[in-house]
Image: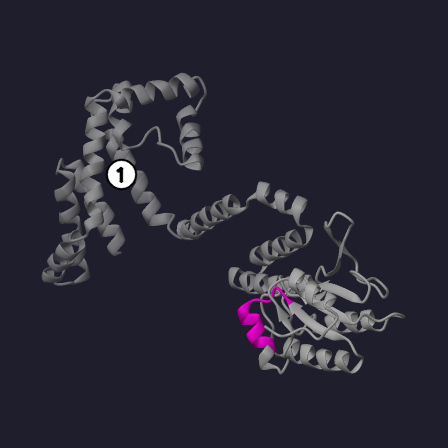
Amino acid sequence: MALTVLCLGFVVLLMLGVPVAFAIGLACLATFAVEGLPFETAIQMMVSGMNVFSFLAIPFFIFSGELMLHGGIADKIVAFARSLVGHWKGGLGLANVAAGFSGTFVVNGSPTKTEMVDEGHSHTQVAQLTTAAMVAIVLLFLTKPLQYLPNAVLSSVVFLIGIKLIDLDGMREILRLRKDEFVVAAITAAIVVGVGVEQGIILAIILSLLLHVKRHYAPADAILTWDAEGHVRGVEPAAGVVSEPGLIVYRFGAGLFYANAQHLSDELLELASAETPPRWIIFDAVAVDDIDFTGGKTLAELSAQLGRQGVTLAFADTRRAVRAEIERYGVTGPFFESVGAAREAFRAEGTPPTH
């Protein structure tokens, strides 16, 4: 009932020639009177409703429309639209549909209505009344079908934003360079689309951690050897492979932690159990950036076991923090600043001093 009184009152006042602003206010007051609401409430709501910064967009929009109208921009827009689609029946309507999909300027929007009315040789308020009547019909009878429109529009906006976030070129590059990381990215994207963003982020973190553990589970370790010219090259560790007679320089390619500690222990024990066991194993720790509890205990047990077999486990290129971790577990070295210094100590054929 209130909506009917509001719309009909507004239309009637417009037909009587009342200015639009006064017609809106009087129609609202009539609605308050029919509903039995106090006029003081109407005034308070009017003042509080007008005290909104975003309402400044309304006068600026009207001002821009006046500039377009008096500057000749509006008639040029209409003429351009008619030159493109004017030869089709309902061409301007099709142009408006296209404008709605692309987010551009609507051809028969407020700034161009005057030009369209002038082009139709209209000299009355019939066009404006027709527009007001169509708005009233929509408000009275079509609100229920249109109640889902905001959700549909918002969903479309979010969908388009999501589409733009998909970097196909980046995904192709990941697939070309790192197939394992591409699998993680593809699974994460599928979970985000099918389940949710939060679940996708959590799964991505878990998969990345598993991938990190997988990479360090079997690191790129090697036995360092030197050719006749003194050039260093890495050889895959195997029983019987030595850097020089009686010496193995073993480089471990990752931080030592619970996932690869057993791998290190098994490999060094295998190297020390060769038919001709080495006297020294130099552990090149240049790539070891951290040692966890399991790694530290493994090194301590490994050093003790190799010592019982008559093999000295020395350390070279060990970072200060890593050396402190190793010593904390009871491993006393010996430690050397470089692999070269450790080799010289081995060649001295004595028990090398610790540094």
Residue at the (70%, 75%) spot, across then down:
351
Task: Report whether 113 appears left or right of 286.
Answer: left
In the image, residue 200 lies at what x, y percent?
A: 56, 61
Q: Residue at x 14, y 37 (%)?
A: 16
Q: Please name the residue that numbered disc 1 is placed on.
A: 132
Is residue 42 at least partly visible in the picture?
yes
For label 1, the SS is helix
Crowding at dot 1, Cα within 10 Å, few <14 / some 14-19 / many 20+, comes out as some
Location of residue 44 by image quarter: bottom left
Visible residue check, residue 11 = no
Residue found at x 75% / y 47%: 229
In the image, residue 192 sits, relative to residue 304, either above or below, namely above
In the displayed structure, does residue 330 sit left or right of residue 122? Answer: right
Q: Position of residue 143 (x, y in %)?
A: 37, 50
Up/down of 112 relative to 299, above or below = above
Magenta segment boundaries in residue numbering: 316-326
Classify residue 169 by image quadrant: top right
Residue 119 is situated, as x and y percent measured from the top left of the image, at 28, 19
Q: Quadrant of residue 337?
A: bottom right
Look at 68% across and 77% down and name the residue there: 299
